[in-house]
């Protein structure tokens, strides 16, 4: 458990840490990371970037990255163009 220098063995500390890290904690950590990423992306895409490049047209906000307004465009394209 301890090395000859008196410090804990790094491999035993890692094993203890991973053994204590449960599936529930992993899911919460993943959800938290995804929420932080999504919030940062949305803040950058629809607030910061348009303020930096003010000459560019402002994007129409959407909730799902990379898919955007595909569903609305397929079903109500005229309404989407009017809103944009």
Image (cartoon, rainbow, N blue to C red):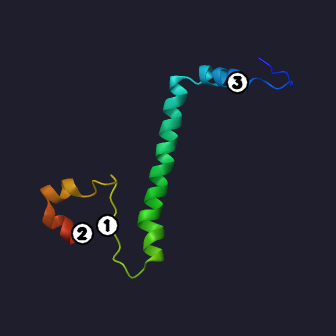
Compared with 43, 11 (above or below) is: above
Quick one: label 1 or label 2, which is nearer the N terminus?
1
Q: Nearer the viewer, residue 55 or 15?
A: 15
Query: Between marks 1 and 2, how big is the CA–CA gap?
Result: 8 Å
Q: What residue sits right under mark 3 in the picture? A: 13
So how many labels did they put on this image?
A: 3
Q: Position of residue 2 (x, y in %)?
A: 80, 19
Q: Position of residue 19 (x, y in %)?
A: 60, 19
Mark 1 element type: loop
Query: Between marks 1 and 3, how big is the CA–CA gap?
Result: 49 Å
Q: Nearer the viewer, residue 23 or 3?
A: 3
Q: Is residue 2 left or right of residue 72?
A: right
Numbered circle sitting on residue 83? 2
Q: Position of residue 37 (x, y in %)?
A: 48, 50
Query: What residue sits 42% from the left and 73% below the top?
Result: 50
Query: What residue sits 86% from the left and 24% below the top?
Result: 6
Of circles 1 and 2, which is in front?
1
Of circles 3 and 2, which is in front?
3
Quick one: label 3 or label 2, which is nearer the N terminus?
3
Query: What residue sits 19% from the left and 69% below the top?
Result: 81
Query: Between marks 3 and 2, how big is the CA–CA gap?
Result: 56 Å
Quick one: label 1 or label 3, which is nearer the N terminus?
3
Q: Residues within 10 Å of mark 3 (few under 14, many from 20)?
A: few
Compared with 2, 51 (above or below) is: below
């Amino acid at each position: 458990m301890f090395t000859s220098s008196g410090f804990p063995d790094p491999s035993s500390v890692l094993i203890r840490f991973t053994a204590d890290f449960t599936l529930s904690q992993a899911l919460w950590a993943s959800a938290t990371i995804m929420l932080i990423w999504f919030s940062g992306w949305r803040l950058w895409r629809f607030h910061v970037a348009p303020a930096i490049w003010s000459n560019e047209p402002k994007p129409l906000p959407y909730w799902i990255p990379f898919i955007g307004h595909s569903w609305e465009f397929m079903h109500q394209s005229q309404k989407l163009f009017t809103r944009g």
